Image (tube, grey):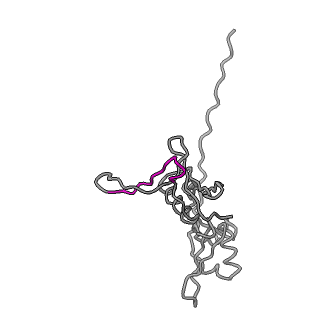
Amino acid sequence: MSAERCRVGVILNGLKQFYVRETEQKREGRWVVIPLFDTDLKQATAMSEAVATAFVKKLQALGVSGMWLEDCRDGRRIEVADESQQQFVEDTRVISRATLDDEYSPDARWYLVKPVNRPNGGPMWLLKCVVPGIPDPQLIYEKDPLSCLQRAQDLNFLQFGERAPAPQPQPVSQKPAAPMARLRPRRS
């Protein structure tokens, strides 16, 4: 149930305070707008829930946390999700080579599959296929590299996918065996 009029609250210096108005202060040679909060509930500014939510989100983006809305009519507390505290997880995926063939076969066809982050799909993988007769490249998005290749094959686009060089076989290095440690007999 949305509130018609509400106040913006925050805990500052250990006290429950409410937004009153904005004031201006000169900092480093320029004027900046500073929100003013007061402990006196009667001084609090009432605003619509939509405006109050936008105001709280603006302050959260500036680093102020622990804010909430309070319904002016019945004092009901309305929580506003703090989007600034969402954890950022770095995407450490790198461009990959993938094949649907036997990876040990010298005739395996390798394709370049790139990691992407889509706004509506999250982390995905992309295979670019330049299909003759279609003016724009066809982009195949899937949750993992092999699914990209499989979908491209199902669409009969895999043969036009962006190719990658075959990986070089890793030489097996022969390390000399470490000499066995000699144990000395214990002296009693």
Residue for point 65% across, 64% down: 2
Vertical position of residue 162 compared to residue 83: above or below: below
Using residue 6 as the reference point, say whether residue 143 is left or right of it: right
Is residue 165 inside the magenta stretch?
Answer: no
Instruction: From the viewer's side, name the closer residue of 12 and 111.
Output: 12
Residue farthest bottom in this picture: 133
Instruction: From the viewer's side, name the closer residue of 137 and 181.
Output: 137
Specify the principal SS of the magenta part.
strand
Vertical position of residue 43 compared to residue 110: above or below: above
Vertical position of residue 49 compared to residue 42: above or below: below
Residue for point 66% across, 72% down: 148
Q: In the image, residue 107 lies at what x, y percent?
A: 65, 72
Which residues, given as a range, are shown in magenta? Answer: 31-43
Quarter location, residue 99 = bottom right
Instruction: From the viewer's side, name the closer residue of 5 and 65.
Output: 5
Q: In the image, residue 120 lies at what x, y percent?
A: 62, 70
Instruction: From the viewer's side, name the closer residue of 137 and 19.
Output: 19
Q: Quadrant of the N terminus?
A: bottom right
Is residue 34 inside the magenta stretch?
Answer: yes
Q: In the image, residue 183 lies at what x, y percent?
A: 66, 22
